[in-house]
């Protein structure tokens, strides 16, 4: 099991459904966790700051947000 696999499994355990981030970030850093793309939605933004702002939806939904 790789560190990417551990990260993906942990996010799944926490109930994460969507990841906010920059283009290709999730593929570059977590490509070895092939099941990740099937488990999470990915909202693409142009800047990390935008992703952090959008992930503020956790305040309103009560769910865990990941940037």
Image (cartoon, rainbow, N blue to C red):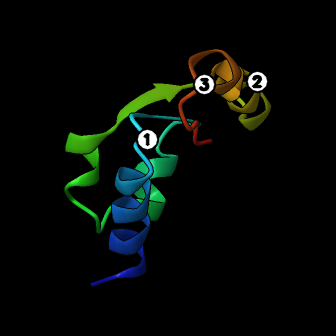
Query: Which circle's residue, 2 or 1, is located before the other in the chain?
Result: 1
Where 40 sits versus 45, above or below?
below
Relative horizontal placement of residue 16, taking residue 21 as reference (left or right)? left
Q: Bin the neighbour count of mark 1 within 10 Å (Cα to Cα): few under 14, some 14-19, many 20 and up.
A: some
Q: Residue furthest front?
A: 62
Mark 2 and mark 3 in contact (Cβ < 8 Å)?
A: no
- Residue under pointer 2: 53
- Label 2: element kind: helix
Q: Residue at x 57, y 18 (%)?
A: 61
Q: Residue at x 63, y 26 (%)?
A: 58
Where 38 sits versus 62, above or below?
below
Where 24 sits versus 18, above or below?
below
- Distance, label 3 to label 1, CA atoms, is 18 Å
Q: Residue at x 33, y 38 (%)?
A: 40
Q: Where residue 11 sits in the image (x, y, percent)?
A: 43, 54
Q: Where residue 62 sits in the image (x, y, percent)?
A: 58, 26
- Distance, label 2 to label 1, CA atoms, is 17 Å
- Residue under pointer 1: 16
Q: Bin the neighbour count of mark 2 within 10 Å (Cα to Cα): few under 14, some 14-19, many 20 and up.
A: few
Q: Bin the neighbour count of mark 3 within 10 Å (Cα to Cα): few under 14, some 14-19, many 20 and up.
A: some
Residue 53 appears in the figure: yes
- Label 1: element kind: loop
Residue nearest the viewer, comparing 52 with 59: 59
């Amino acid at each position: 099991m790789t560190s990417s696999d551990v990260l993906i499994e942990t996010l799944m355990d926490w109930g994460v459904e969507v990841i906010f981030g920059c283009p290709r970030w999730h593929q570059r850093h977590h490509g070895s966790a092939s099941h990740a793309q099937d488990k999470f939605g990915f909202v693409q933004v142009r800047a990390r700051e935008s992703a952090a702002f959008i992930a503020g939806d956790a305040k309103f939904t009560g769910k865990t947000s990941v940037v």
